[in-house]
Image (tube, rainbow, N blue to C red):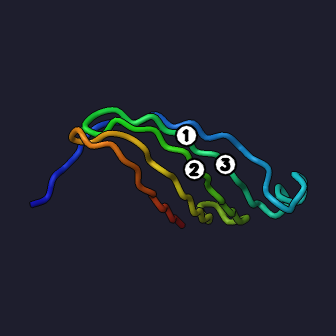
């Protein structure tokens, strides 16, 4: 039986330095890194912590990213955590 959890979230993204590159080199290469912090409310009450890496090109609409977030919270009276993996192009 499939169950559906509903809710909403707010997200805070903060730029971070790109490991192994100074800020000028990272900007020139169009590579980025950000921290991800979310507050989730609804059937799932949770917070997340994660990081995202991104790359852009000179072509409008051309980019990609990967992100990992650890979600910690309560759902249906049970407390725990799990990891989300995002990818996009």
Dot 2 crowding, Cα within 10 Å, few <14, some 14–19, many 20+? some
Q: Which residue is mark 2?
A: 50
Q: Which residue is mark 1?
A: 37
Q: Is residue 16 above or below residue 40?
A: below
Left or right, residue 72 beside residue 54: left
Q: CA distance from mark 3 to mark 2?
A: 9 Å
Q: CA distance from mark 1 to mark 2?
A: 7 Å
The numbered disc on residue 12 is none
Residue at x 40% of width, y 50% of height: 81
Dot 1 crowding, Cα within 10 Å, few <14, some 14–19, many 20+? some
* Residue 59 in picture, x, y percent from top left: 67, 66
Which type of secondary structure does the marked residue at label 2 adopt? strand
Q: CA distance from mark 3 to mark 1?
A: 10 Å
Q: Is residue 57 above or below residue 76?
A: below
The foreground one among 28 and 85 is 85
The foreground one among 23 and 3 is 3
Left or right, residue 48 beside residue 57: left
Looking at the rendered image, the quarter that the N terminus falls into is bottom left
Q: Which residue is mark 3?
A: 34
The foreground one among 40 and 8 is 40
* Residue 75 in picture, x, y percent from top left: 27, 42
Q: Are marks 1 and 2 in contact (CB under 8 Å)?
A: yes
Which type of secondary structure does the marked residue at label 3 adopt? strand
In the image, which is nearer the foreground, mark 3 or mark 1? 1
Q: Are marks 3 and 1 in contact (CB under 8 Å)?
A: no
* Residue 69 in picture, x, y percent from top left: 51, 53
């Amino acid at each position: 039986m499939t169950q559906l959890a509903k809710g909403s979230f707010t997200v805070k993204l903060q730029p971070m330095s790109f490991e192994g590159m100074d800020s000028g080199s990272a900007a020139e290469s169009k590579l980025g890194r950000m921290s991800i912090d979310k507050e989730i409310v609804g059937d799932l009450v949770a917070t997340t912590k994660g990081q995202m890496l991104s790359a852009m090109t000179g072509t409008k609409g051309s980019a990609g990213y990967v992100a990992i977030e650890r979600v910690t919270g309560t759902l249906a009276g049970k407390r725990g955590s799990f990891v989300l993996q995002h990818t996009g192009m």
